[in-house]
Image (cartoon, rainbow, N blue to C red):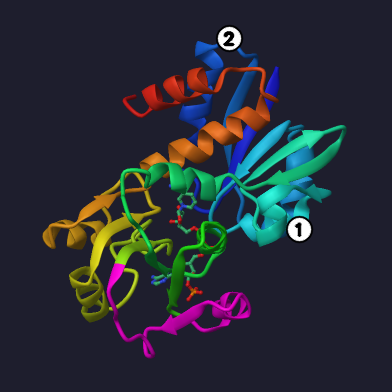
Amino acid sequence: MKLFAIFGDPVSHSRSPLMHNSVFKSLNYKACYTRVHLQDGSKLRKTFFDLSLDGANITVPHKEAAFRACDEVKGFAQKIGVVNTIVKEDGKLIGYNTDADGFLYAIKDFKNIKKILILGAGGTAKALVNKFLDEKLHVEVLNRGESRLHYFQELGIICHTWNTLQVQKYDLVVNTTSAGLKDENLPAPDAIIQNLLQNTIFVADAIYGKMTPFLQQAKAHKKEYKDGADMLLGQGVLANELFTKNELESEDIKTFMQKSFDL
Ligand code: NDP
């Protein structure tokens, strides 16, 4: 029996155990997926081994700590320094990132996206910005604090704080902050949010499982919007393929993971 877990703080809201266990049970794969409330990201590696895990997902705020915890980091995760999936291979921790491809899957119905504003500058923002750059899209970042913007400035990205933003026209505004996750905060002051929503076509929020204050405002502005559920599904299918080392069919993983959303 293999054992997997999600690490986060908070983590009680996470649907990942339900999603992965639904796949394992339905496809008779001998594995179980649990959750670990981890407050200190520097203890991730030790906790992983103490629990004899075979793999893990990592959520807020430990994705950068997860990068540091790995013996080797592959592909897109290496490029961005952010890991959301760890698989134990030959006793070593190998890191991956499935968030960005999960997000592209989520917004596939939004057509003709060329100019994007990302709210937030954490791990999820790094993943999405790099993916959008790979796709040759114009992307800018707005964050509350300045320090996390340095990474994006070094990429040559136009960055704003709440004080410096001059709102333009966007095709898509995405909330990747954790504002609204366990509180009722907007990701920026109300005046900025109202202005942004008047000047964008599409809206997305990485948070899932609740109508965030940001999405409530998007709805009030009659914008087409997506919450983080499809992103969650996309990243989850890709993570499950890594956990099961491609022994299961992708379409089957997707079907049973999707079904768990109704539970
Ligand atoms: P990080 O902790 O790496 O980054 C959080 C960001 O949010 C920082 O830029 C921080 O700004 C900003 N922030 C936090 N609180 C506030 C606030 N009250 N107002 C404005 N900005 C704020 O988080 P992650 O990037 O890992 O995750 C971000 C969100 O995305 C989480 O809610 C997570 O659940 C969700 N997520 C969903 C996924 C899905 O599959 N649907 C996948 C991945 C993430 P500052 O620098 O100023 O502190």
Packing grade of label 2 (10 A; few <14, some 14-19, many >=20) is few
Amino acid type at image mark 1: Arg
Residue 81 picture location, percent across and down:
69, 60
Q: Quadrant of the C terminus?
A: top left
Asked if residue 24 lies in the magenta stretch, the reply is: no
Magenta residues, start to end = 145-170
Question: Residue 21, labelled with which disc?
Answer: none
Residue named by callout 2: 28
Q: How much space separates mark 1 and mark 2, taking CA atoms? A: 33 Å
Which residue is drawn at the image coordinates 53% and 77% (left, top)? 157
Residue 139 sits in quarter: bottom left
Indicate the position of residue 146 as horizontal and vertical percent values: 52, 84
Name the residue at the top extreme: 28
Q: Nearer the viewer, residue 209 or 120?
A: 120
- Element type at mark 2: loop
Q: Which residue is mark 1?
A: 68
Task: Say which residue appears at 44% left-offset and 76% top-offset.
Answer: 143
